[in-house]
Image (spheres, coloured by chain):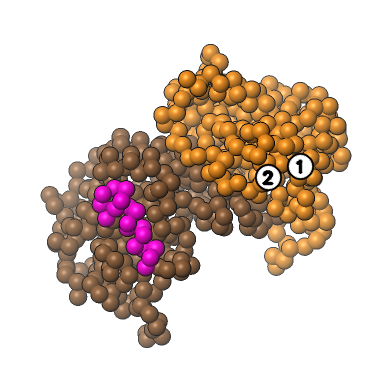
Chain colours: A orange, B brown
Amino acid sequence: MHPRERLAYSPIEGRPLLKLPKGVRLVVWPVLALEEWDMARPMARMVISPPQGQPMLPDHPNWSWHEYGMRVGFWRLRKMMLKLGITPTVTLNARVCETYPVVVKACIDSGWELNAHGYDQVPMHKLDDQRAVIMKSMDVIEKFSGKRPRGWFGPGLTQTFDTLDYLSEAGVEYIGDWVLDDEPVTLKTSHKPVVALPYNFEIHDIVMMALQHLPSDQWHARALDHFKTLYAESAERPKVMAMACHPYLSGVPHRIGHVERTFAEILAHEGVVSWDGAKILDWYLDARAKSVA
Amino acid sequence: MNFPKPSVGMLPNDRLAYSAIPSRKPLKLPKGARMVVWTITNVEEWDPTQTMPRTVLTPPAGGSPMPDIPNWCWHEYGNRVGFWRLLQVYDDFKIPGVMNINGVAVQSYPDIVETCVERNWEFIGHGFTQRNMQKVENERADIRKSAEVIEKATGKRPRGWLGPGLTETWETPDILAEEGYDYVADWVLDDQPVWMKTRGKPILNIPYTQECNDVAMMLIQHHKASEFYERAMDQFEQIYKDAKGSARVMAISVHPYIMGAPHRPKYFRKIYEKIRKKRDVLFWTGSQIADWYMKVGPKPA
Protein backbone atom coordinates (compact mmCIF):
# COMPACT_ATOMS: atom_id res chain seq x y z
CA MET A 1 0.00 0.00 0.00
CA HIS A 2 0.98 3.61 -0.55
CA PRO A 3 1.91 5.08 2.87
CA ARG A 4 -1.05 7.47 2.80
CA GLU A 5 -3.47 4.58 2.33
CA ARG A 6 -2.15 3.21 5.59
CA LEU A 7 -2.22 6.54 7.40
CA ALA A 8 -3.83 9.82 6.34
CA TYR A 9 -1.99 13.10 6.92
CA SER A 10 -2.95 14.71 10.23
CA PRO A 11 -1.38 17.77 11.87
CA ILE A 12 -0.52 17.15 15.52
CA GLU A 13 -2.43 20.21 16.68
CA GLY A 14 -6.09 19.72 17.38
CA ARG A 15 -6.14 15.93 17.69
CA PRO A 16 -7.98 14.16 20.52
CA LEU A 17 -5.70 13.96 23.55
CA LEU A 18 -4.06 10.71 24.58
CA LYS A 19 -3.73 10.64 28.35
CA LEU A 20 -0.73 9.28 30.21
CA PRO A 21 -1.16 7.87 33.72
CA LYS A 22 -1.29 10.48 36.46
CA GLY A 23 2.07 12.05 37.16
CA VAL A 24 3.63 11.01 33.83
CA ARG A 25 4.10 13.52 31.02
CA LEU A 26 6.98 12.20 28.96
CA VAL A 27 8.08 8.64 28.26
CA VAL A 28 11.68 7.89 27.35
CA TRP A 29 11.97 4.88 25.08
CA PRO A 30 15.53 3.48 25.12
CA VAL A 31 16.29 1.25 22.15
CA LEU A 32 19.35 -0.97 22.07
CA ALA A 33 20.07 -2.57 18.70
CA LEU A 34 22.00 -5.82 18.36
CA GLU A 35 23.12 -6.80 14.89
CA GLU A 36 24.85 -9.61 13.09
CA TRP A 37 27.09 -8.51 10.24
CA ASP A 38 27.66 -11.34 7.80
CA MET A 39 31.30 -11.29 6.69
CA ALA A 40 30.37 -12.65 3.28
CA ARG A 41 28.61 -9.33 2.49
CA PRO A 42 29.64 -5.69 2.48
CA MET A 43 29.47 -4.35 6.04
CA ALA A 44 26.31 -2.53 7.11
CA ARG A 45 28.28 0.57 8.16
CA MET A 46 31.93 1.50 7.99
CA VAL A 47 34.15 3.32 10.44
CA ILE A 48 37.16 3.16 8.14
CA SER A 49 37.11 3.07 4.36
CA PRO A 50 39.74 0.99 2.59
CA PRO A 51 42.74 2.59 0.87
CA GLN A 52 41.70 4.04 -2.52
CA GLY A 53 38.10 3.74 -1.34
CA GLN A 54 37.51 0.39 -3.07
CA PRO A 55 35.07 -1.77 -1.07
CA MET A 56 36.65 -5.04 -0.06
CA LEU A 57 35.40 -8.50 0.81
CA PRO A 58 35.96 -9.70 3.42
CA ASP A 59 36.01 -6.40 5.29
CA HIS A 60 37.88 -7.35 8.47
CA PRO A 61 38.37 -3.87 9.95
CA ASN A 62 34.71 -2.92 9.84
CA TRP A 63 33.54 -6.34 10.88
CA SER A 64 35.83 -6.04 13.89
CA TRP A 65 34.35 -2.63 14.67
CA HIS A 66 30.93 -4.18 15.04
CA GLU A 67 32.34 -7.21 16.87
CA TYR A 68 33.95 -4.89 19.42
CA GLY A 69 30.45 -3.65 20.17
CA MET A 70 29.29 -7.17 21.00
CA ARG A 71 32.41 -8.13 22.94
CA VAL A 72 32.87 -4.91 24.91
CA GLY A 73 30.44 -2.11 24.08
CA PHE A 74 27.26 -4.03 24.87
CA TRP A 75 28.51 -4.83 28.37
CA ARG A 76 29.27 -1.20 29.05
CA LEU A 77 25.81 -0.18 27.93
CA ARG A 78 24.25 -2.95 29.98
CA LYS A 79 26.07 -1.88 33.10
CA MET A 80 24.96 1.71 32.54
CA MET A 81 21.33 0.71 32.02
CA LEU A 82 21.25 -1.51 35.08
CA LYS A 83 22.79 1.30 37.12
CA LEU A 84 20.17 3.78 35.95
CA GLY A 85 17.31 1.27 36.21
CA ILE A 86 16.50 1.52 32.50
CA THR A 87 14.79 -1.36 30.73
CA PRO A 88 15.33 -0.82 27.01
CA THR A 89 13.69 -2.42 24.05
CA VAL A 90 16.36 -4.69 22.62
CA THR A 91 15.88 -4.93 18.88
CA LEU A 92 17.96 -7.75 17.51
CA ASN A 93 18.69 -9.53 14.30
CA ALA A 94 17.28 -12.97 15.13
CA ARG A 95 20.56 -14.56 14.14
CA VAL A 96 22.15 -12.91 17.18
CA CYS A 97 20.37 -15.61 19.26
CA GLU A 98 22.52 -18.15 17.39
CA THR A 99 25.81 -16.26 17.18
CA TYR A 100 25.84 -14.30 20.46
CA PRO A 101 23.54 -16.33 22.76
CA VAL A 102 25.30 -15.05 25.87
CA VAL A 103 24.39 -11.48 24.93
CA VAL A 104 20.73 -12.31 24.36
CA LYS A 105 20.60 -14.31 27.62
CA ALA A 106 21.97 -11.31 29.48
CA CYS A 107 19.15 -9.21 28.04
CA ILE A 108 16.51 -11.76 29.01
CA ASP A 109 17.96 -12.11 32.51
CA SER A 110 17.70 -8.34 32.91
CA GLY A 111 14.01 -8.50 32.03
CA TRP A 112 14.46 -6.57 28.80
CA GLU A 113 11.95 -6.71 25.94
CA LEU A 114 13.14 -8.46 22.78
CA ASN A 115 12.00 -6.92 19.51
CA ALA A 116 12.64 -8.47 16.10
CA HIS A 117 15.08 -6.67 13.77
CA GLY A 118 15.10 -9.06 10.81
CA TYR A 119 17.23 -12.17 10.64
CA ASP A 120 20.46 -10.37 9.78
CA GLN A 121 21.39 -6.80 8.98
CA VAL A 122 20.23 -6.75 5.36
CA PRO A 123 17.65 -4.30 3.95
CA MET A 124 14.19 -5.79 3.40
CA HIS A 125 14.44 -4.94 -0.32
CA LYS A 126 17.29 -7.36 -0.80
CA LEU A 127 15.50 -10.42 0.58
CA ASP A 128 14.22 -13.01 -1.87
CA ASP A 129 11.38 -14.07 0.38
CA GLN A 130 10.60 -11.27 2.79
CA ARG A 131 7.61 -13.02 4.26
CA ALA A 132 9.58 -16.13 5.13
CA VAL A 133 12.42 -14.10 6.68
CA ILE A 134 9.97 -12.15 8.85
CA MET A 135 8.35 -15.36 10.07
CA LYS A 136 11.74 -16.96 10.70
CA SER A 137 12.99 -13.92 12.65
CA MET A 138 9.94 -14.00 14.91
CA ASP A 139 10.13 -17.78 15.36
CA VAL A 140 13.85 -17.85 16.20
CA ILE A 141 13.48 -15.19 18.89
CA GLU A 142 10.36 -16.85 20.28
CA LYS A 143 12.11 -20.19 20.44
CA PHE A 144 15.17 -18.75 22.17
CA SER A 145 13.36 -16.56 24.68
CA GLY A 146 10.02 -18.30 25.12
CA LYS A 147 8.13 -15.16 24.06
CA ARG A 148 7.06 -14.06 20.60
CA PRO A 149 8.26 -10.50 19.99
CA ARG A 150 5.47 -7.91 19.84
CA GLY A 151 7.55 -5.31 18.05
CA TRP A 152 9.69 -4.93 14.95
CA PHE A 153 12.32 -2.64 13.48
CA GLY A 154 13.41 -3.30 9.89
CA PRO A 155 17.18 -3.30 9.31
CA GLY A 156 17.89 0.38 8.58
CA LEU A 157 14.09 0.77 9.08
CA THR A 158 13.69 -0.43 5.49
CA GLN A 159 10.34 -1.60 4.19
CA THR A 160 8.76 -2.30 0.85
CA PHE A 161 5.14 -1.34 0.20
CA ASP A 162 3.94 -4.73 1.46
CA THR A 163 6.25 -5.32 4.45
CA LEU A 164 3.64 -4.19 6.97
CA ASP A 165 1.15 -6.75 5.74
CA TYR A 166 3.65 -9.57 6.32
CA LEU A 167 4.58 -8.16 9.71
CA SER A 168 0.97 -8.12 10.82
CA GLU A 169 0.51 -11.64 9.54
CA ALA A 170 3.53 -12.78 11.59
CA GLY A 171 2.02 -11.34 14.77
CA VAL A 172 3.87 -8.01 14.99
CA GLU A 173 1.79 -5.49 16.97
CA TYR A 174 4.04 -2.42 16.75
CA ILE A 175 6.90 -1.12 14.64
CA GLY A 176 9.46 1.64 15.02
CA ASP A 177 10.08 2.08 11.30
CA TRP A 178 7.73 4.99 10.66
CA VAL A 179 9.35 8.04 12.14
CA LEU A 180 6.70 10.59 11.30
CA ASP A 181 5.02 11.74 14.49
CA ASP A 182 5.50 12.48 18.17
CA GLU A 183 2.60 10.21 19.10
CA PRO A 184 1.87 6.57 18.29
CA VAL A 185 -0.29 6.15 15.20
CA THR A 186 -2.29 3.20 13.88
CA LEU A 187 -1.42 1.87 10.42
CA LYS A 188 -3.77 -0.11 8.20
CA THR A 189 -2.57 -3.44 6.90
CA SER A 190 -4.20 -6.27 5.00
CA HIS A 191 -4.43 -8.10 8.35
CA LYS A 192 -4.71 -6.49 11.78
CA PRO A 193 -3.66 -2.85 12.16
CA VAL A 194 -0.10 -2.25 13.35
CA VAL A 195 0.89 0.61 15.65
CA ALA A 196 3.87 2.80 14.71
CA LEU A 197 5.58 4.05 17.87
CA PRO A 198 7.42 7.38 17.68
CA TYR A 199 11.01 6.38 17.13
CA ASN A 200 13.37 9.09 15.90
CA PHE A 201 16.27 9.87 13.60
CA GLU A 202 17.64 12.63 15.75
CA ILE A 203 18.75 11.02 19.02
CA HIS A 204 20.07 8.09 17.09
CA ASP A 205 23.74 7.19 17.30
CA ILE A 206 24.06 5.96 13.71
CA VAL A 207 22.64 9.19 12.33
CA MET A 208 24.53 11.48 14.71
CA MET A 209 27.86 9.73 14.89
CA ALA A 210 28.29 7.44 11.87
CA LEU A 211 26.53 9.63 9.27
CA GLN A 212 26.66 13.20 10.53
CA HIS A 213 30.06 12.83 12.24
CA LEU A 214 29.16 15.01 15.20
CA PRO A 215 31.48 15.27 18.21
CA SER A 216 30.69 12.77 20.98
CA ASP A 217 29.40 15.42 23.37
CA GLN A 218 26.63 16.17 20.87
CA TRP A 219 25.00 12.95 22.06
CA HIS A 220 24.28 14.86 25.24
CA ALA A 221 23.79 18.38 23.83
CA ARG A 222 21.38 17.37 21.07
CA ALA A 223 19.43 15.02 23.31
CA LEU A 224 18.99 17.68 25.98
CA ASP A 225 17.85 20.27 23.42
CA HIS A 226 15.48 17.69 22.00
CA PHE A 227 14.23 16.78 25.45
CA LYS A 228 13.64 20.38 26.54
CA THR A 229 11.38 21.04 23.58
CA LEU A 230 9.39 17.84 24.12
CA TYR A 231 9.24 18.36 27.87
CA ALA A 232 7.79 21.85 27.45
CA GLU A 233 5.28 20.52 24.92
CA SER A 234 4.38 17.63 27.22
CA ALA A 235 2.54 20.11 29.42
CA GLU A 236 -0.17 19.95 26.75
CA ARG A 237 0.24 16.62 24.97
CA PRO A 238 2.00 13.44 26.10
CA LYS A 239 5.38 12.91 24.47
CA VAL A 240 7.54 9.89 23.78
CA MET A 241 11.27 10.33 23.28
CA ALA A 242 13.19 7.43 21.78
CA MET A 243 16.95 7.20 22.12
CA ALA A 244 18.76 4.69 19.95
CA CYS A 245 22.03 3.01 20.91
CA HIS A 246 24.22 0.60 18.99
CA PRO A 247 27.00 -1.06 20.98
CA TYR A 248 29.69 -0.28 18.36
CA LEU A 249 28.83 3.44 18.54
CA SER A 250 27.37 4.32 21.94
CA GLY A 251 29.36 1.64 23.78
CA VAL A 252 32.82 2.94 22.90
CA PRO A 253 34.94 4.49 25.66
CA HIS A 254 34.74 8.13 24.56
CA ARG A 255 30.94 8.16 24.15
CA ILE A 256 29.53 6.08 26.96
CA GLY A 257 30.02 8.88 29.49
CA HIS A 258 27.96 11.25 27.37
CA VAL A 259 25.28 8.61 26.89
CA GLU A 260 25.11 7.95 30.61
CA ARG A 261 24.78 11.58 31.70
CA THR A 262 22.15 12.11 28.99
CA PHE A 263 19.90 9.37 30.37
CA ALA A 264 20.60 10.36 33.98
CA GLU A 265 19.77 14.04 33.48
CA ILE A 266 16.63 13.43 31.46
CA LEU A 267 15.26 10.79 33.82
CA ALA A 268 15.82 13.08 36.80
CA HIS A 269 12.96 15.34 35.61
CA GLU A 270 9.58 15.13 37.25
CA GLY A 271 7.01 13.21 35.26
CA VAL A 272 9.62 11.47 33.09
CA VAL A 273 9.66 7.67 33.01
CA SER A 274 11.51 5.07 30.96
CA TRP A 275 9.32 2.43 29.31
CA ASP A 276 9.97 -0.26 26.75
CA GLY A 277 8.05 -0.52 23.49
CA ALA A 278 5.59 -3.13 24.74
CA LYS A 279 4.61 -0.93 27.66
CA ILE A 280 4.20 2.13 25.41
CA LEU A 281 2.04 0.03 23.10
CA ASP A 282 -0.20 -1.17 25.93
CA TRP A 283 -0.61 2.39 27.19
CA TYR A 284 -1.42 3.64 23.69
CA LEU A 285 -4.02 0.96 22.95
CA ASP A 286 -5.77 1.80 26.19
CA ALA A 287 -5.47 5.59 25.78
CA ARG A 288 -6.63 5.43 22.18
CA ALA A 289 -9.77 3.56 23.20
CA LYS A 290 -10.49 6.18 25.86
CA SER A 291 -9.72 9.19 23.68
CA VAL A 292 -12.38 8.35 21.09
CA ALA A 293 -15.28 10.44 22.24
CA MET B 1 35.40 34.43 -22.10
CA ASN B 2 33.09 33.25 -24.86
CA PHE B 3 31.56 29.98 -23.83
CA PRO B 4 29.49 27.94 -26.28
CA LYS B 5 25.87 29.04 -26.12
CA PRO B 6 23.03 26.63 -25.39
CA SER B 7 20.58 26.00 -28.22
CA VAL B 8 17.63 27.07 -26.05
CA GLY B 9 17.76 29.70 -23.31
CA MET B 10 20.79 31.76 -22.33
CA LEU B 11 24.14 31.57 -20.59
CA PRO B 12 24.09 33.19 -17.14
CA ASN B 13 26.16 36.22 -18.15
CA ASP B 14 23.92 36.87 -21.14
CA ARG B 15 21.05 37.34 -18.68
CA LEU B 16 23.08 39.30 -16.20
CA ALA B 17 26.39 41.07 -16.79
CA TYR B 18 28.98 40.96 -14.05
CA SER B 19 28.76 43.93 -11.70
CA ALA B 20 30.85 44.74 -8.61
CA ILE B 21 28.65 45.65 -5.64
CA PRO B 22 30.59 48.79 -4.56
CA SER B 23 30.34 50.27 -8.06
CA ARG B 24 26.54 50.55 -7.96
CA LYS B 25 24.36 53.51 -7.17
CA PRO B 26 23.33 53.28 -3.47
CA LEU B 27 20.00 51.62 -2.78
CA LYS B 28 17.84 53.22 -0.10
CA LEU B 29 15.21 51.51 2.03
CA PRO B 30 12.28 53.39 3.56
CA LYS B 31 12.75 55.20 6.87
CA GLY B 32 16.50 54.87 6.85
CA ALA B 33 16.49 51.08 7.25
CA ARG B 34 19.76 49.38 6.36
CA MET B 35 18.76 45.90 5.39
CA VAL B 36 15.91 43.47 4.83
CA VAL B 37 15.57 39.94 6.20
CA TRP B 38 13.22 37.50 4.53
CA THR B 39 12.47 34.11 6.03
CA ILE B 40 11.48 31.23 3.79
CA THR B 41 9.85 27.99 4.92
CA ASN B 42 9.96 25.19 2.37
CA VAL B 43 7.13 22.68 2.44
CA GLU B 44 7.62 19.68 0.22
CA GLU B 45 5.78 16.50 -0.54
CA TRP B 46 7.95 13.56 -1.49
CA ASP B 47 6.58 10.90 -3.80
CA PRO B 48 7.03 7.56 -2.01
CA THR B 49 7.36 5.77 -5.37
CA GLN B 50 10.47 7.79 -6.29
CA THR B 51 13.97 8.10 -4.86
CA MET B 52 13.80 10.47 -1.88
CA PRO B 53 15.24 13.96 -2.51
CA ARG B 54 17.30 13.78 0.71
CA THR B 55 17.98 11.11 3.31
CA VAL B 56 18.68 11.18 7.03
CA LEU B 57 19.32 7.44 7.35
CA THR B 58 20.99 5.33 4.70
CA PRO B 59 20.22 1.60 4.43
CA PRO B 60 22.68 -0.99 5.77
CA ALA B 61 25.58 -1.32 3.29
CA GLY B 62 24.31 1.70 1.33
CA GLY B 63 22.33 1.97 -1.89
CA SER B 64 19.00 3.66 -2.63
CA PRO B 65 16.20 1.24 -1.82
CA MET B 66 12.80 1.70 -3.37
CA PRO B 67 10.48 2.44 -1.70
CA ASP B 68 12.39 4.38 0.93
CA ILE B 69 9.79 4.45 3.69
CA PRO B 70 12.06 5.65 6.54
CA ASN B 71 13.13 8.78 4.69
CA TRP B 72 9.62 9.41 3.37
CA CYS B 73 8.45 9.33 7.00
CA TRP B 74 11.17 11.78 7.93
CA HIS B 75 9.75 14.44 5.60
CA GLU B 76 6.20 13.62 6.70
CA TYR B 77 7.21 14.26 10.33
CA GLY B 78 8.08 17.79 9.26
CA ASN B 79 4.57 18.40 8.01
CA ARG B 80 2.73 16.61 10.83
CA VAL B 81 4.79 18.02 13.71
CA GLY B 82 7.82 20.12 12.76
CA PHE B 83 6.03 22.86 10.80
CA TRP B 84 3.90 23.75 13.84
CA ARG B 85 6.99 24.38 15.92
CA LEU B 86 8.46 26.74 13.33
CA LEU B 87 5.11 28.50 13.02
CA GLN B 88 5.30 29.49 16.69
CA VAL B 89 8.53 31.34 16.01
CA TYR B 90 6.97 33.21 13.07
CA ASP B 91 3.97 34.07 15.24
CA ASP B 92 5.91 35.09 18.33
CA PHE B 93 8.16 37.45 16.40
CA LYS B 94 5.59 38.60 13.83
CA ILE B 95 7.78 37.50 10.95
CA PRO B 96 6.03 37.94 7.60
CA GLY B 97 6.01 34.39 6.23
CA VAL B 98 7.14 33.16 2.86
CA MET B 99 5.76 29.71 2.05
CA ASN B 100 7.76 28.05 -0.67
CA ILE B 101 5.66 25.02 -1.48
CA ASN B 102 5.47 22.17 -3.99
CA GLY B 103 2.21 22.16 -5.97
CA VAL B 104 1.36 18.65 -4.78
CA ALA B 105 1.90 19.70 -1.15
CA VAL B 106 -0.75 22.40 -1.50
CA GLN B 107 -3.28 19.62 -1.98
CA SER B 108 -1.83 17.16 0.54
CA TYR B 109 -1.33 19.51 3.49
CA PRO B 110 -4.43 21.71 3.54
CA ASP B 111 -4.01 22.47 7.26
CA ILE B 112 -0.64 24.08 6.60
CA VAL B 113 -2.01 26.04 3.64
CA GLU B 114 -5.05 27.33 5.58
CA THR B 115 -2.90 28.34 8.53
CA CYS B 116 -0.58 30.36 6.30
CA VAL B 117 -3.44 31.93 4.32
CA GLU B 118 -5.01 33.10 7.60
CA ARG B 119 -1.72 34.82 8.44
CA ASN B 120 -1.41 36.34 5.00
CA TRP B 121 1.87 34.59 4.20
CA GLU B 122 3.19 34.95 0.69
CA PHE B 123 3.10 31.70 -1.30
CA ILE B 124 5.75 31.12 -3.94
CA GLY B 125 6.17 28.33 -6.47
CA HIS B 126 8.60 25.53 -5.61
CA GLY B 127 7.96 23.18 -8.52
CA PHE B 128 4.91 21.01 -8.77
CA THR B 129 6.90 18.14 -7.21
CA GLN B 130 10.25 18.01 -5.42
CA ARG B 131 12.15 16.98 -8.52
CA ASN B 132 15.11 18.52 -10.32
CA MET B 133 13.67 20.88 -12.97
CA GLN B 134 16.01 19.24 -15.49
CA LYS B 135 14.20 15.95 -14.93
CA VAL B 136 10.69 17.34 -15.14
CA GLU B 137 8.99 16.16 -18.29
CA ASN B 138 7.33 19.42 -19.29
CA GLU B 139 8.86 22.37 -17.53
CA ARG B 140 6.29 24.93 -18.64
CA ALA B 141 3.37 22.75 -17.59
CA ASP B 142 5.03 22.18 -14.19
CA ILE B 143 5.58 25.91 -13.66
CA ARG B 144 2.04 26.74 -14.77
CA LYS B 145 0.40 24.03 -12.64
CA SER B 146 2.37 25.21 -9.60
CA ALA B 147 0.89 28.68 -10.04
CA GLU B 148 -2.61 27.35 -10.63
CA VAL B 149 -2.84 25.21 -7.49
CA ILE B 150 -1.46 28.01 -5.35
CA GLU B 151 -3.92 30.48 -6.86
CA LYS B 152 -6.80 28.08 -6.33
CA ALA B 153 -5.93 27.44 -2.68
CA THR B 154 -4.92 30.96 -1.65
CA GLY B 155 -6.79 33.22 -4.06
CA LYS B 156 -3.52 34.76 -5.23
CA ARG B 157 -1.30 33.81 -8.11
CA PRO B 158 2.31 33.40 -6.90
CA ARG B 159 4.68 36.16 -7.95
CA GLY B 160 7.84 34.37 -6.88
CA TRP B 161 9.63 31.12 -7.69
CA LEU B 162 12.33 29.06 -6.01
CA GLY B 163 13.06 25.82 -7.88
CA PRO B 164 13.41 22.44 -6.15
CA GLY B 165 17.03 22.37 -4.99
CA LEU B 166 17.36 25.69 -6.94
CA THR B 167 17.62 23.65 -10.15
CA GLU B 168 17.04 25.31 -13.50
CA THR B 169 17.36 24.48 -17.17
CA TRP B 170 18.87 27.04 -19.56
CA GLU B 171 15.45 28.49 -20.18
CA THR B 172 13.78 28.42 -16.74
CA PRO B 173 13.86 32.23 -16.28
CA ASP B 174 12.33 32.68 -19.77
CA ILE B 175 9.45 30.35 -18.96
CA LEU B 176 8.92 31.91 -15.52
CA ALA B 177 8.65 35.39 -17.03
CA GLU B 178 6.29 34.14 -19.72
CA GLU B 179 4.13 32.42 -17.12
CA GLY B 180 3.72 35.64 -15.19
CA TYR B 181 6.19 35.26 -12.32
CA ASP B 182 7.77 38.57 -11.25
CA TYR B 183 10.77 37.23 -9.38
CA VAL B 184 12.95 34.19 -8.87
CA ALA B 185 15.41 33.38 -6.05
CA ASP B 186 17.44 30.56 -7.62
CA TRP B 187 20.45 32.69 -8.43
CA VAL B 188 22.42 33.01 -5.22
CA LEU B 189 25.01 35.46 -6.53
CA ASP B 190 24.47 38.83 -4.87
CA ASP B 191 23.37 40.67 -1.72
CA GLN B 192 21.01 42.90 -3.71
CA PRO B 193 18.22 42.09 -6.14
CA VAL B 194 19.28 42.05 -9.78
CA TRP B 195 17.42 42.20 -13.07
CA MET B 196 17.85 39.29 -15.44
CA LYS B 197 17.16 39.29 -19.16
CA THR B 198 14.81 36.72 -20.58
CA ARG B 199 13.62 36.28 -24.15
CA GLY B 200 10.52 38.23 -23.11
CA LYS B 201 10.23 40.73 -20.32
CA PRO B 202 12.95 40.80 -17.64
CA ILE B 203 12.63 38.97 -14.34
CA LEU B 204 13.98 40.05 -10.96
CA ASN B 205 16.24 37.80 -8.90
CA ILE B 206 16.10 38.23 -5.12
CA PRO B 207 19.02 37.25 -2.84
CA TYR B 208 18.47 33.81 -1.39
CA THR B 209 20.97 31.77 0.63
CA GLN B 210 22.94 28.56 0.67
CA GLU B 211 24.65 29.71 3.85
CA CYS B 212 21.77 30.20 6.28
CA ASN B 213 19.94 27.23 4.90
CA ASP B 214 19.25 24.16 7.01
CA VAL B 215 19.66 21.71 4.11
CA ALA B 216 23.21 22.85 3.46
CA MET B 217 24.15 23.30 7.11
CA MET B 218 22.56 20.34 8.80
CA LEU B 219 22.28 17.69 6.09
CA ILE B 220 25.26 18.32 3.89
CA GLN B 221 27.77 19.94 6.21
CA HIS B 222 26.54 18.08 9.32
CA HIS B 223 26.88 20.97 11.72
CA LYS B 224 25.47 20.79 15.21
CA ALA B 225 22.18 22.64 15.67
CA SER B 226 23.61 25.65 17.50
CA GLU B 227 25.73 26.44 14.44
CA PHE B 228 22.56 27.55 12.67
CA TYR B 229 22.25 30.39 15.15
CA GLU B 230 25.98 31.18 15.26
CA ARG B 231 26.28 31.37 11.52
CA ALA B 232 23.09 33.37 11.06
CA MET B 233 24.36 35.96 13.54
CA ASP B 234 27.77 36.17 11.86
CA GLN B 235 26.05 36.50 8.49
CA PHE B 236 23.66 39.13 9.85
CA GLU B 237 26.36 41.24 11.50
CA GLN B 238 28.45 41.33 8.36
CA ILE B 239 25.56 42.21 6.06
CA TYR B 240 24.39 44.86 8.52
CA LYS B 241 27.88 46.40 8.45
CA ASP B 242 28.12 46.13 4.66
CA ALA B 243 24.72 47.82 4.29
CA LYS B 244 25.91 51.13 5.72
CA GLY B 245 25.83 53.06 2.45
CA SER B 246 23.55 50.88 0.35
CA ALA B 247 20.81 48.43 1.35
CA ARG B 248 21.30 44.68 1.35
CA VAL B 249 19.09 41.63 1.72
CA MET B 250 19.57 38.58 3.92
CA ALA B 251 17.63 35.33 3.56
CA ILE B 252 17.08 32.62 6.16
CA SER B 253 15.68 29.36 4.86
CA VAL B 254 14.26 26.41 6.81
CA HIS B 255 12.55 23.09 6.18
CA PRO B 256 10.10 21.61 8.71
CA TYR B 257 11.72 18.15 8.60
CA ILE B 258 15.09 19.63 9.51
CA MET B 259 14.65 22.78 11.59
CA GLY B 260 11.37 21.47 13.03
CA ALA B 261 13.04 18.48 14.76
CA PRO B 262 12.74 19.01 18.53
CA HIS B 263 16.38 19.84 19.16
CA ARG B 264 16.64 22.63 16.57
CA PRO B 265 13.80 25.24 16.80
CA LYS B 266 15.48 26.82 19.82
CA TYR B 267 18.31 28.04 17.58
CA PHE B 268 15.92 29.33 14.91
CA ARG B 269 14.08 31.26 17.64
CA LYS B 270 17.29 32.70 19.12
CA ILE B 271 18.11 34.42 15.82
CA TYR B 272 14.90 36.46 15.95
CA GLU B 273 15.28 37.15 19.64
CA LYS B 274 18.43 39.00 18.64
CA ILE B 275 17.60 40.62 15.32
CA ARG B 276 13.88 41.33 15.46
CA LYS B 277 14.40 44.26 17.84
CA LYS B 278 16.66 46.15 15.45
CA ARG B 279 14.83 49.28 14.37
CA ASP B 280 16.74 49.67 11.13
CA VAL B 281 16.13 46.12 9.89
CA LEU B 282 13.00 45.34 7.89
CA PHE B 283 11.31 41.95 7.91
CA TRP B 284 9.64 41.53 4.56
CA THR B 285 8.28 38.96 2.16
CA GLY B 286 9.79 38.37 -1.27
CA SER B 287 7.08 40.45 -2.91
CA GLN B 288 7.76 43.39 -0.64
CA ILE B 289 11.44 43.21 -1.59
CA ALA B 290 10.53 42.98 -5.27
CA ASP B 291 8.11 45.92 -5.13
CA TRP B 292 10.62 48.10 -3.32
CA TYR B 293 13.42 47.31 -5.75
CA MET B 294 11.23 47.80 -8.80
CA LYS B 295 10.39 51.24 -7.47
CA VAL B 296 13.78 52.52 -6.26
CA GLY B 297 16.33 50.32 -8.02
CA PRO B 298 17.80 50.70 -11.49
CA LYS B 299 15.48 49.86 -14.34
CA PRO B 300 16.24 46.70 -16.33
CA ALA B 301 18.73 47.16 -19.14
Q: Secondary structure at mark 1?
A: helix
Are both tags, 1 and 2, on one chain? yes
Residue B146 sits above or below residue A180 on the image: below
- The residue at which mark 1 appears reads as A134
* Disc 2 target residue: A163
Check if mark 1's residue and mark 2's residue have beta carbons within 8 Å: yes
Question: Is residue B200 left or right of B232 when viewed as pictured?
Answer: left
Q: Residue at x 29, y 43 (%)?
A: B117
Question: In the figure, is residue B240 to the left or right of B67?
Answer: left
Q: Is residue A269 magenta?
A: no
Residue at 50% across, 22% down? A292
Residue B28 at what x, y percent from top left?
Answer: 15, 58
Q: Which is more toward the observer, B43 or B22?
A: B43
Q: Which residue extends farthest left?
A: B31
Magenta stretch holds residue B155: yes
Q: Amino acid at mark 1?
A: Ile
Q: Residues within 10 Å of mark 1 (few under 14, many from 20)?
A: many
Label 2: how many Cα within 10 Å (few below 14, some 14–19, many 20+):
some
Range of the magenta residues?
A: B140-157
Label for residue A48? Answer: none
Helix, strand or loop: magenta stretch: helix
Query: Can see residue B259?
Result: no
- Report the residue at 35% width, 77% height from top: B9
Q: Chain of mark 1?
A: A
* Above or below, comparing residue A248 to residue A182 in the picture: below
Left/right placement of residue B1 relative to residue B215 reads left
Q: Position of residue A229 (x, y in %)?
A: 46, 31
Amino acid at circle 2: Thr
